[in-house]
Structure formats: structure tokens, C-alpha cells
Amino acid sequence: MSLTYSNYLKLPELLRLQNVQSDPPQHDETLFIIIHQVYELWFKLLLHEFDKIKRDFSSNDLYGASATLKRTRTIMKTLVAQLDILETMTPMSFLSFRDRLAAASGFQSAQFRELEFLLGHKRPELLKFQEEGSPDRSVLERRLNEPSLVDHFYDFLEHRGVQIPAELRDKDIRAPSVPHERIQQGLINLYRTQPDVANLLEQVTDFDEGLQEWRYRHVKMVERTIGHRQGTGGSPGVEFLKESLFKPIFPDLWEIRDKL
């Protein structure tokens, strides 16, 4: 069989994956399924792109990292825009099929948790939400035990003359990233002396802002839809989601804004 648009993209298989659980079928469940399937595809692409950016940072490839960072920011804008579509579903529409989701919850998204770990927002305690020995648990354990994007960012800064404190290099690899005054001083110096690097640092900040924007919009969408009910499948719900608001991946870049 010759290659066609349909078989290249596996469209027959893809378009058979939207199976509603409600009986009788509720109209908005199809929307709910498609939106979340598309999110998972975007998460897969973000993981793919950030694995490249990690390599770019460690090899001092400024322009390669810059081009890919621009792509990741554009993806984040798309993730935010998709919430506008999801918010056309009323709370009553969601409640019409919510009970049929049983234990299934977006909180179980292994790819989003993987993305957080990759970026440096590591929380080992969240492994408990994935079944021990499962493929998802194995992937998350691998991400937890490998250098994060921030660690590779330190490689890039070191290439550019910033001395990375030993306590950052030697910290527990499973621990989340933390701000450091010496990193901040090095960043300020780069902003003032290396315009091409300053542009890259703004792109990093731009992605970080985009991720925080998505978190905020996601929290408000959940709050608007289910209020302060417990999340689907017994997940923590809105209050847990709020804990991650305004926690940047690159805190040092935010700490220096009033010093540039």
C-alpha cells in the first residue's frame, strides 16, 4: 500500500479513540475526551522539544536552544487557548457524565508530571499516584533521577562564564530547583554584557510565564466547573492545583527583574 495522508497519520486508529462512557451518550463528553487527548499530544511534543533544549544547553548551542524555546512558548499559548474551548462546556454538562469517569482523573497524567520533573519541579511524593511497577511509574522514576532542564541550564551558564555554586551541582538530584544569589549575579552580568544571551534568557522567562499562565487558567477552569468539590476520581482538586501557582521553573530569572 502506498503512503497516504490517512495511513501516515494513522487516522482510522486515531479517530476511533473517542469512546464516551455515558449512557445515554452525553453530547459534551466527546469534547471533553478530544481536548484531553490533544493535551496529551502537546505534552508529548513538549517533552520531545525540551529533551533537545537540554542537549542544546549542555553543548552551548545558543541558537538551537533559542529556536526551540520559541516553539515551546507557542505551544504553551495553544494550551491556554484550548481552555477557551473547554470552558464552553457548562458545569451542568460536565456533571452529566462526570460520575462515569470513575477513578480516572487528569491528575493522573503521567506525561504532565514527567514534564514537571524534566523542568525541575520535582516532587517524589507524587509517584504514589502511579501504580508501582507500571510503565508510567518507571518513566517518572527515570525523570526524577536524571538532571533537569535547570541543571542543563547551569551547563549553559557555565559555558558563558557563570560560576555554578558547588551546593547546586551537588544537591540531591531528586530535589526541586532552588534560587541562588550567585546565579542571580551571574545572570545580571550576562544581561549587561552578552546581548545574544540576554535574548535567550528572555525566551526562557517567556516560557516560564506561559507555564504559569496555563496553570492559572487551568485552576480557574476547574474551579469554574466543579467549584471546591473533590477532584475526579478522588484527586485533590482546586486547592492542590493552587499550590503550584506562581512557582516559576527559573526563580533566579524572576528575582533579578528589579536589578536589570
Image (cartoon, helix red, strand yellow):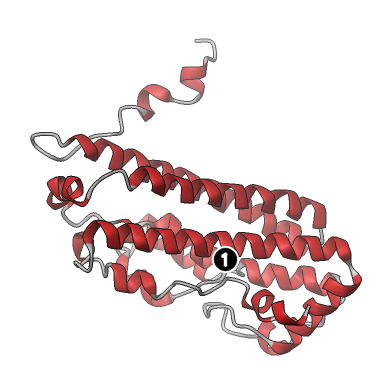
Q: Mark 1 points at which residue?
A: 119
Does residue 40 sit above or below 110 in this rendering?
above
Asked whether residue 113 appears in the rendered view, the answer is no
Q: Nearer the viewer, residue 229 or 159?
A: 229
The residue sitting at the right extreme is: 193
Looking at the image, residue 220 sits to the left or right of residue 67; the answer is left
Measuring 81% from the left and 57% from the top, which residue is drawn there? 62
Measuring 77% from the left and 51% from the top, which residue is drawn there? 64
Q: How many numbered marks appear? A: 1
Q: Nearer the viewer, residue 24 or 226?
A: 226
Measuring 67% from the left and 89% from the top, which residue is drawn there? 167
Looking at the image, residue 246 sits to the left or right of residue 179; the answer is left
Quadrant in the rendering for residue 190: bottom right
Image coordinates of residue 177 in percent, x first then y, are 58, 78
Quadrant in the rendering for residue 23: top left
The residue sitting at the top extreme is: 1
Task: Tell me the amino acid under the disc marked 1.
Answer: Leu
Q: Nearer the viewer, residue 26 or 128?
A: 26
SS under mark 1: helix
Image coordinates of residue 245 in percent, x first then y, are 45, 72
Q: Which of 17 and 210 is in front in this view?
A: 210
Image coordinates of residue 231 in percent, x first then y, are 23, 63
Does residue 186 sit above or below 117 in this rendering?
below
Looking at the image, residue 188 sits to the left or right of residue 37; the answer is right
Asked whether residue 18 appears in the rendered view, the answer is yes
Measuring 62% from the left and 55% from the top, which residue is drawn there? 50
The residue sitting at the left extreme is: 24
Image coordinates of residue 14 in percent, x first then y, are 38, 29
User: Which quarter of the rendered picture does the C terminus lie within?
Assistant: bottom right
Looking at the image, residue 9 sits to the left or right of residue 88; the answer is right
Q: How crowded is mark 1: few (under 14 residues within 10 Å), some or many (20 or more)?
A: many
